[in-house]
Image (cartoon, helix red, strand yellow):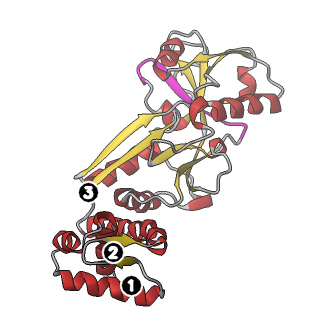
């Protein structure tokens, strides 16, 4: 059995006309008849009943038709994947990032774009409330905290990096300009600003658990759904944010300080997630690009 036989079988089954099947496949009618005869010998059944005026597909032929179409379509997809990979990759990938996934995907995407400038890259934020049950959906890849990924046999993940938490303070506040670190206990009487649990649930829960571990019950304002509004509040001295380090990197150095937490391990594991049997050839190239920076359990992403 070969692809030419299947193509001719599909054409005859769809048109019930050997002459039209020959025309569609750019072969002679005798070649179509030979291909069909070869298939009938291989399966040991009659696929068509032929007379001078009519061609009737048999029940066995009807049963074979959807499988033949699937085989031909799969082979076409495989050829497309191989051709695009051989040509250096063209196409599109769609990336979903939760609000706390910033620096690592940025570095990967920058390198990937340099290597494959003809591949369209669409980067979108996703709503954690909507995506926890179906993290892939419309995206080829999602960057997010590892604990956000629900158990799903159809999803693969790659540990990308560990992200530590950082405290943001106003330069005009009581913690001054020259400090590099801070103790959690120093925050016990401060107003803490957090990204909303609805948009950043894992980071929110990690911070709450961390404070509970140290028996700290500060006043917490968790209403911030945008980083920009949180920074305005922090720079104004309204409160003190605790956020992932890479997110803190985009804050204004003119008005705020970034302080490491000195008395606790605040690492949060981040992953890239995607469909296990992803067929997009451009996506396959992106996986290889990300693997250069994601080194598994020992990879602490150095900002």
User: Element type at marker 2?
Assistant: helix
Magenta stretch: includes residue 241: no
87 relative to 38 in the view: left or right = left
Residue shown at the point (72%, 22%) measured from the top left? 186
| Residue 145 % position (x, y) | 60, 42
Nearest the viewer among 285 and 145 is: 285
| Residue 167 % position (x, y) | 60, 27
Q: How many marks can you see?
A: 3
- Labels 2 and 3 touching (C-beta < 8 A): no
Q: Quadrant of residue 50?
A: bottom left
| Residue 192 % position (x, y) | 66, 18
Report the disc number at residue 90: 3
User: Element type at marker 3?
Assistant: loop
Residue shown at the point (61%, 22%) measured from the top left? 196
Residue shown at the point (65%, 31%) measured from the top left? 201
The 10 Å Cα crowd at callout 2, few under 14, some 14 to 19, many 20 or more, is: many
Q: Which residue lies furthest to the right in this view?
A: 215
Q: How far separated are the C-alphas under marks 3 and 1?
A: 37 Å
Report the disc number at residue 39: 1
Q: How far separated are the C-alphas under marks 2 and 3?
A: 33 Å
Q: Name the residue under label 2.
A: 9
Of the two numbered discs 2 and 3 in the rendering, the one whose residue sits closer to the viewer: 2
Residue shown at the point (42%, 23%) measured from the top left? 252
Q: Which residue lies furthest to the front in this view?
A: 52
Q: What stretch is highlighted in magenta?
A: 252-264
184 relative to 160 in the view: left or right = right
- Labels 1 and 2 touching (C-beta < 8 A): yes
Magenta stretch: includes residue 262: yes
Q: How far separated are the C-alphas under marks 1 and 2?
A: 8 Å
79 relative to 142 in the view: left or right = left
Nearest the viewer among 252 and 33 is: 33
């Amino acid at each position: 059995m070969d692809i030419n036989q299947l193509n001719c079988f599909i054409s005859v089954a769809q048109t019930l006309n050997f002459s039209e099947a020959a025309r569609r496949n750019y072969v002679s009618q005798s070649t179509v008849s030979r291909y069909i005869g070869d298939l009938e010998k291989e399966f040991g059944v009659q696929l068509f009943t032929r007379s001078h005026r009519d061609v009737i597909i048999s029940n066995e032929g009807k049963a074979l038709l959807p499988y033949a179409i699937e085989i031909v379509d799969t082979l076409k997809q495989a050829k497309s994947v191989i051709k695009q990979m051989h040509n250096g990759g063209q196409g599109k990938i769609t990336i979903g990032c939760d609000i706390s996934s910033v620096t690592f995907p940025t570095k990967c995407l920058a390198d990937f774009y340099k290597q494959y400038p003809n591949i369209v890259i669409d980067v979108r934020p996703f709503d954690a409330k909507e995506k926890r049950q179906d993290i892939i959906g419309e995206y080829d890849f999602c960057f997010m905290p590892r604990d956000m990924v629900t158990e799903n046999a159809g999803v693969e993940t790659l540990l990308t990096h560990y992200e530590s938490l950082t405290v943001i303070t106003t330069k005009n506040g009581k913690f001054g300009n020259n400090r590099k670190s801070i103790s959690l206990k120093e925050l016990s009487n401060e107003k803490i600003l957090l990204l909303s649990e609805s948009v950043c649930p894992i980071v929110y829960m990690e911070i709450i658990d961390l404070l509970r571990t140290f028996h700290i019950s500060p006043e917490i304002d968790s209403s911030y759904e945008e980083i920009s509004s949180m920074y305005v509040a922090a720079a104004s001295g309204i409160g003190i944010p605790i956020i992932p380090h890479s997110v803190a990197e985009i804050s204004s150095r003119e008005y705020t300080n970034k302080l490491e937490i000195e008395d606790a391990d605040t690492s949060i594991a981040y992953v890239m997630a995607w469909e296990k049997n992803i067929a997009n050839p451009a996506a396959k190239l992106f996986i290889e690009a990300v693997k250069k920076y994601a080194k598994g359990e020992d990879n602490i992403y150095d900002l």
